[in-house]
């Protein structure tokens, strides 16, 4: 341990820890020492060492920062504009016509508002898949959050779309003092053809980049793909080589039994992101097959999708809903347990975005992405089972402090790096132009 003052010492909290079997546990009355953005030690008892900043966290629990494993952050600008619609009408009649109006400024302001929401909800890293991503990368650098970013593309854009996705990934890899990681981001097998997917897989291997893609989002997509092409969306990923890369599959509620051996035999590192609130809202008949994926050793990270479909970037809610929906769909109240849900929210989500060795647990050598959750409120007392209290009683609004790379981004509910009122005001001024659908254009056609 160095003689110089630590950058940050957090005292008096319970800390969520993982044992060598990756089981969740808690250490009471712990002290966390942070130096140079890294957790130096986690010990029990008082801390006598000097520190530039100290946080007294009595009555609070320290968790690894939550990871939103699949979202479209700038779409907070469309929160609530496309309500109570089936998927096809949601895309074709509202969202894709509005997105044809998007400017880089709209994306920047949406990303800033989204980052504010996520920081306040204890999200320290998000995986984003959208357009004009240079603007998102700039916001991430400025506000201090961590992000896994990809410039989305459709085959309808021609080869330029794929080339832009690659250029973005190479240009921003390791940006924001290493807080930005990047990915190639083909939209989905129904909007990106096999030739583009195969070329993307080749580029991923050549440049050491992962791939983030929507696939088998719902059962209709799987059924339509089978009827038209004789293969499922997951089988399309296999035949185009995407499953030979490190791939993050968004949603997967349409993954069929025949897809499971395909995923098991993938030579790349496969992960799936689940965003259950949107599936309920769209009345999709199935959810992400978390248990089947677990049995294959495939990490399932928690996500929100964009706020245009989910209305919220609340990963805390995704954690509770994932646990509840799994109990309901499997007919087994023992699956998922609260501890399993916390595992999905921490280590599995970190692995899903390729950061499993960097974040996802509070342990020496990990980056200091830490949130402090206040459990003194009446809705979280008394605490008989700390894991159950966190998953089923606590809310994202109980997050008091959010730390990324050892830097405090929110302290005692006060955001320190984003001016929310000015963002809301500026975004509001841009709404009429953004929402205008009189031009009759749309960026894409949803037909699955």
Image: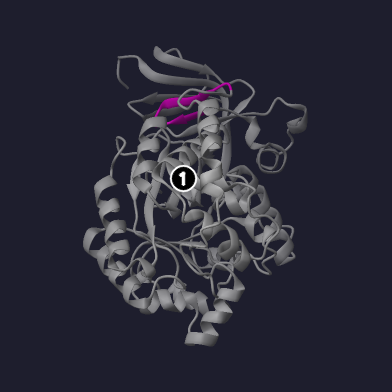
Give neighbour class at mark 1: few <14, some 14-19, many 20+ (Cα, 10 Å).
Answer: many
Give the percent coordinates (x, y) of residue 403: 47, 29
In this picture, residue 283 sits left or right of residue 130:
right
User: How far across and how far down the image is residue 353, in percent?
Assistant: 42, 52
Q: Residue furthest front?
A: 438
Q: Is residue 43 above or below residue 388?
A: above
Residue located at (39% from left, 66% from top): 154
Q: Which residue is mark 1?
A: 126
Residue 49: which quarter of the image? top left
Q: Nearer the viewer, residue 214 or 75?
A: 75
Please indicate whether residue 118 sits to the left or right of residue 168 in the image: right
Residue 101 drawn at (x, y percent): 47, 52
Along the line of sight, the residue nearer the viewer: 132 or 197: 132
Horizontal relation, residue 196 to residue 376: left or right: left
Between 448 and 388, the residue placed more toward the observer is: 448
Q: Is residue 253 visible?
A: yes
Quadrant for the N terminus, please: top left
Give the magenta range.
402-412
């Amino acid at each position: 341990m160095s003689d110089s003052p630590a950058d940050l010492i957090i005292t008096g909290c319970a800390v969520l820890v993982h044992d060598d079997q990756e089981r969740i546990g808690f250490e009471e009355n712990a002290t966390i020492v942070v130096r140079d953005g890294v957790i130096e030690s986690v010990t029990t008892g008082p801390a006598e060492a000097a520190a530039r900043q100290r946080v007294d966290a009595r009555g609070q629990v320290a968790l690894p920062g939550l990871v939103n494993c699949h979202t479209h952050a700038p779409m907070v600008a469309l929160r609530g504009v496309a309500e109570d619609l089936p998927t096809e009408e949601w895309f074709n009649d509202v969202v894709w016509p509005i997105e044809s109006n998007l400017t880089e400024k709209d994306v920047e302001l949406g990303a800033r508002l989204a980052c504010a929401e996520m920081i306040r909800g204890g999200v320290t890293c998000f995986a984003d898949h959208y357009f004009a991503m240079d603007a998102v990368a700039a916001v991430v650098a400025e506000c201090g959050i961590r992000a896994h970013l990809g410039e989305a593309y459709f085959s309808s854009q021609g080869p330029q779309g794929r080339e832009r996705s690659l250029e973005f990934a190479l240009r921003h890899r390791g940006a924001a003092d290493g807080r930005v990681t990047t990915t190639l981001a083909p939209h989905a097998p129904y909007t990106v053809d096999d030739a583009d997917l195969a070329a993307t897989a080749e580029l991923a291997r050549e440049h050491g980049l992962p791939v983030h893609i929507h696939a088998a989002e719902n059962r209709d997509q799987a059924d339509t793909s089978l009827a038209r092409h004789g293969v499922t969306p997951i089988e399309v990923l296999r035949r185009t080589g995407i499953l030979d890369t490190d791939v993050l599959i968004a949603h997967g509620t349409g993954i069929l039994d025949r897809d499971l051996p395909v995923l098991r035999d993938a030579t790349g590192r496969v992960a799936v992101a689940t965003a259950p609130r949107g599936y309920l809202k769209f009345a999709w008949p199935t959810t992400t097959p978390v248990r089947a994926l677990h049995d294959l050793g495939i990490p399932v990270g928690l996500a929100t999708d964009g706020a245009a479909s989910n209305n919220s970037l609340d990963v805390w809610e995704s954690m509770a809903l994932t646990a509840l929906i799994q109990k309901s769909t499997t007919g087994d109240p023992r699956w998922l347990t609260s501890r399993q849900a916390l595992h999905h929210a921490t280590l599995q989500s970190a692995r899903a975005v390729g950061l499993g060795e960097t974040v996802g647990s509070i342990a020496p050598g990990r980056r200091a992405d830490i949130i402090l959750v206040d459990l003194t409120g009446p809705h979280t007392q008394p605490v008989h089972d700390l894991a159950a209290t966190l998953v089923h009683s606590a809310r994202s609004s109980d997050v008091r402090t959010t730390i990324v790379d050892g830097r405090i981004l929110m302290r005692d509910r006060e955001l320190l790096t984003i001016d929310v009122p000015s963002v809301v005001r500026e975004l509001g001024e841009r709404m009429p132009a953004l929402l205008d659908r009189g031009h009759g254009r749309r960026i894409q056609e949803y037909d699955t």
